[in-house]
Image (cartoon, rainbow, N blue to C red):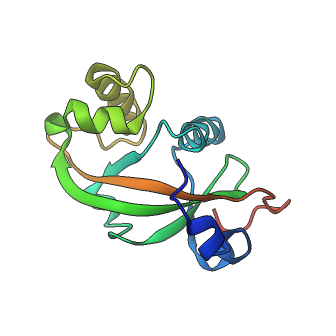
Amino acid sequence: MIADGLRSEVPWETQWETLDRFAFGDQPVLADRLLDLVLRGLKTATCWPVEEGQQTEVGRRSAVCDGNGRPRAVLETVSIEQMAFDQVNQEFAAKEGEGDSSLDHWRTSHREYFERAGVYRPDMLLWCETFRLISIIETPPQSPDGC
């Protein structure tokens, strides 16, 4: 759900160019699938290995890109904390919004993802972020730039 009132207060449709950009996942098709969950209001959280660094902080806004590298939405970090993979709970798994939103699905899909990256360990530390959708970028640029 888009934050009330922010679309009219801050014209992110024209000012998102100044924000850091990222895409979810490790493949264009996954980036598109996860972005779709965000746009439908089903995905409000994500995570990554601590070794990749703290990529955001509470209140920070960034542009999320689709699988073609085009910015499609503005997100704002609501919370961020470190948690071990094997300590992630059902509440966080549901916020990730993937599959059936169960903890079992989260563990299976994220284990596969981190194994592809060669970093999986049951006790690996993750940055666990929750975010909110601030704005949808209605007309993304035609050429990828920065994701």
Is residue 116 toward the left or the right of residue 35 in the image? Answer: left
**Residue 85 seen in this snapshot:** yes
Q: Is residue 10 above or below residue 129?
A: below
**Total numbered badges shown on the rendered structure:** 0
The residue positioned 76% from the left and 56% from the top of the image is 138
Quarter-of-image position of residue 30: top right
Quarter-of-image position of residue 37: top right
Front-most of residues 31 and 19: 19
The residue positioned 74% from the left and 74% from the top of the image is 14
Front-most of residues 61 and 5: 5
The residue positioned 21% from the left and 58% from the top of the image is 81
Front-most of residues 116 and 55: 55
Q: x, y (%) of residue 88? A: 20, 38
**Residue 122 seen in this snapshot:** no
Q: Residue furthest right?
A: 142
Q: x, y (%) of residue 67? A: 68, 46
Quadrant occupied by the C terminus: bottom right
Quarter-of-image position of residue 70: bottom right
Q: Is residue 38 above or below residue 112?
A: below
Is residue 120 toward the left or the right of residue 13 in the image? Answer: left
Q: x, y (%) of residue 49? A: 30, 52
Q: Is residue 98 above or below residue 87?
A: above
The residue positioned 65% from the left and 35% from the top of the image is 29
Q: Residue furthest front?
A: 5
Q: x, y (%) of residue 71? A: 68, 60
